[in-house]
Amino acid sequence: MKPMAHLGVGIGWRPEIADAVERLPGLDWVEVVAENVCPGHLPESLLRLRERGTRVVPHGVSLGLGGADRPEPAKLAALGERAVALGAPLVTEHIAFVRTSSPVLEAGHLLPVPRTRDALDVLCENVRIAQDSLPVPLALENIAALFSWPGEELTEAQFLTELVERTGVRLLIDVANLHTNRVNRGEDPAAVLDAIPLEALAYVHVAGGIERDGVWHDTHAHPVPPVVLDLLAALRSRVDPPGVLLERDDDFPAEAELAGELAAIRAVVTAGPPAPGRPAVAGSGPAAAEPRPDAEPDPAAERDAADEPLPVEESARTRVALGQAALLSALVAGTPVPEGFDRRRIRVQARALAAKRADVVARLAPELPEILGGPDPYREAFLSYAKGRPMTAGYRRDALDFAEDLLIRDLPADPVARRRLTAWWRDRTGARPPRRIVRWARALAGRAA
């Protein structure tokens, strides 16, 4: 495996903190959510960062490479376009599933894949398809989870190791997610770090969260806790990471606090060399601040050592699809929890998914809470809607469907607010809200299918 280019210490670029990010001292690179940028209309802040030599890495959240279906060519093409537009040395995604095709359901969130042979076979084939389509190398992130799958056949370390061996994909290790899974699933972070191929490390994520009622929520909205910095130090004692990145997605603090968190991360990263006998990633460290031209990874060469894979049997995809559909239906459509899952944890996850839907729709369509009389009435109305309407086509469509649902039920009760909501919906759809009879016909057709 070719050495990974040195990235240094960076932060997740978000529009809300764009100005602060540009001013942060000693910032080496940034990561941007791939789906939030348009290649032909990059934000001015990102363009200025690029002009001064700051590297930008696109981080995808919607491919769902752990899902039963093969990755969508259009999504792969879009991710590749963003890598080219940003001049990125690599792209990253997650070991997760986010949707099912039968029934058509969207989680709007990264959900864990079962660590089974079937799921690993499907994931490996999906990763190879993605690697063949992308113009730069791919790295995959371990995700945080609230629950475990029953009947798992592999540990986290075994699953990640075999994934790397079979595909040559690189790893993005999120140490905050290791802590989350320690609390929520009883997994030992040290056992994971000891057993995975650290020579495949692309970079590291660090983020904050909070514990409530024995469940750790990976919020990206709280300061990085000492326990996560301790895990970063544990990883650093094993390997010299090519890059480390601070993630913050909500409740953004003052610029000085962000700078302080980056300084704490940098202090851990520069604390000293890895322990004797541990791998040091070539192309990293102070001497490699400027990556050598020959240190850039080659997407094709990443997989030279892997045997030519056999196609995944469709029966394996079918088994994975059935399991994921049953779980996602329980999480977003109120169907019974599949046998073997922790029902309490599934209920916690279902509530979290509904709350996330409400929050994201409010950010995408801030007019809706205003029209409905404020955050509390909006949230109450949206959560009521979400109980009977699983998301099927992403958050933007969800916002329109929510407004349509209200209008069909002659809501909101205030006629002025209802007229405003009608105008908002019509402006974005170019249509008139369907009448009740149309909605009933749609519902009956959906049940018949």
Image (cartoon, grey):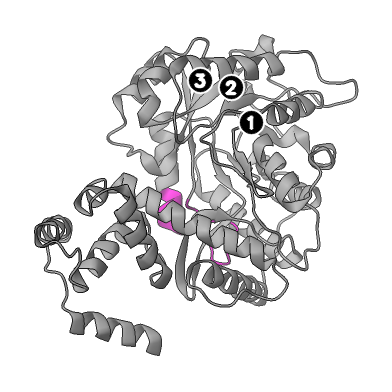
Residue 210 or residue 148, whichever sits in front:
210
Q: Which residue is mark 3?
A: 258
- Give the crowd class for mark 3: few <14, some 14-19, many >=20 residues within 10 Å: many
Point 83% across, 37% down: residue: 190
Q: Could you give the CA–CA distance between mark 3 and mark 2, rounded to whole angstroms?
A: 19 Å
Q: Can residue 224 be seen here?
A: yes
Q: Which residues are magenta?
A: 62-77
Q: Position of residue 438 (x, y in %)?
A: 20, 82
Q: Is residue 373 magenta?
A: no
Label 3 element class: helix
Q: Amino acid at mark 3?
A: Leu
Q: Is residue 69 magenta?
A: yes
- Mark 3 vs mark 2: in front: 3
Residue 448 vs residue 364: left or right? right
Q: Position of residue 375 (x, y in %)?
A: 32, 48
Label 1 element class: strand
Q: Amino acid at mark 2?
A: Leu
Helix, strand or loop for the magenta stretch, by majority: loop
Q: Can residue 392 be seen here?
A: no
Point 33% across, 37% down: residue: 39
Q: Are marks 1 and 2 in contact (CB under 8 Å)?
A: yes
Q: Which residue is mark 1?
A: 203
Looking at the image, is mark 3 or mark 2 earlier in the sequence?
2
Residue 255 vs residue 329: left or right? left
Q: Could you give the CA–CA distance between mark 3 and mark 1, rounded to whole angstroms?
A: 19 Å
Q: Could you give the CA–CA distance between mark 1 and mark 2, rounded to whole angstroms?
A: 8 Å
Point 13% across, 60% down: residue: 426
Q: Amino acid at mark 1?
A: Tyr
Residue 157 or residue 416, whichever sits in front:
416
Q: Which residue is mark 2?
A: 7
Residue 80 or residue 62, whichever sits in front:
62
